[in-house]
Structures are given as structure tokens and as C-alpha cells.
Amino acid sequence: MMRYLRYAFLAVLAILLITVALANREPVTLRLMTDDLALATGLTSSVTLPLFIVIFGGILAGILIGFVWEWFREHKHRAAAATHRREKDRLQREVSRMKQTGSDPDDEILALLESSGAKR
């Protein structure tokens, strides 16, 4: 059922985007910099494109900027998760090493760890 809803949504979105593209086919001139700056640098300052390409390009640029912004914003969370993962792995190796060395059988902590390992 969800698959059909997703396909229906994508079909409606495709029809909407095609309609916008067909309604906005007129060429527009997009100036990349002011005329004075273009003369000073010797670069082409404008390009002529259909309006729908400018619209879709703006939407795509906004999405990409949002993804990059979010990736930078979540860096601290990814770094903390990696630190916790390394610490967990180190502790698991230490527990395994302690179990293999045959530590004191009266050690309460190791007895708890062994009993929790048996329940898994």
C-alpha cells in the first residue's frame, strides 16, 4: 500500500514539475556579476537560459546547501558516536582478555559479566 502511495506522489510531483517547465520555457538572461565587474575581470557576466532551468537550479542549489549545512551541524554528534564506539570496543576487548586470563573466580564483577553473557 505504501509503495503505491509513493508512486502516486512521485507521479503527481512529476506532472507538476513538467507543467512548471512547460509554462516557463521563455529564455531569461541570468547575470552572474555586475557589468562593471565583468569588464574588469574579462569574464562573461551573463547566460541565457529557459526560466524553468533557473527555477529548478535554484531549488537544487537550496537542497544542496541544506544538506551540506546539516552535515556540518551534525559533525559533533558523529564525532561523539565514534568516540563512544571506540570506547565500547576497547571495553569489550578488555572484558574478553580478563575472561581468557582466568581471573579470580570470586570476582563479583566478572561473575556478573559472565552471567549477562550467558543470557544473550
Image (cartoon, grey):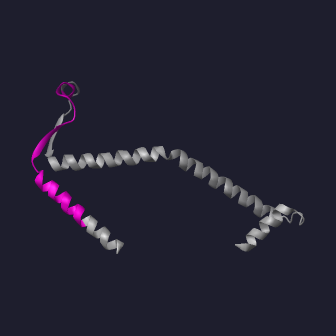
Of all residues shown, which one is farthest toward the left?
26
In-image side of 54 versus 5 (left or right)? left
Residue 70: horizontal and vertical position, in percent? Answer: 43, 47
Residue drawn at x 21%, y 24% is 40
Residue 68: horizontal and vertical position, in percent? Answer: 40, 46
In-image side of 15 versus 59 (left or right)? left
- Residue 100 in view: no
In-image side of 42 versus 78 (left or right)? left
Q: Quadrant of the C terminus?
A: bottom right
Residue 43: horizontal and vertical position, in percent? Answer: 21, 32
Q: Is residue 74 above or below residue 12?
A: above
Q: Nearer the viewer, residue 93 or 120?
A: 120
Residue drawn at x 75%, y 73% is 118
Label count reads: 0
- Residue 52 in view: yes
Residue drawn at x 75%, y 68% is 116
Give the magenta range: 11-38
Of all residues shown, which one is farthest toward the bottom?
1
**Is residue 23 highlighted in magenta?**
yes
Residue drawn at x 35%, y 48% is 64
Q: Is residue 23 above or below residue 103?
A: above
Residue 46: horizontal and vertical position, in percent? Answer: 17, 36
Q: Nearer the viewer, residue 64 or 45?
A: 64
Q: Quadrant of the N terminus?
A: bottom left
Q: Main secondary structure of the magenta part?
A: helix
**Is residue 37 highlighted in magenta?**
yes
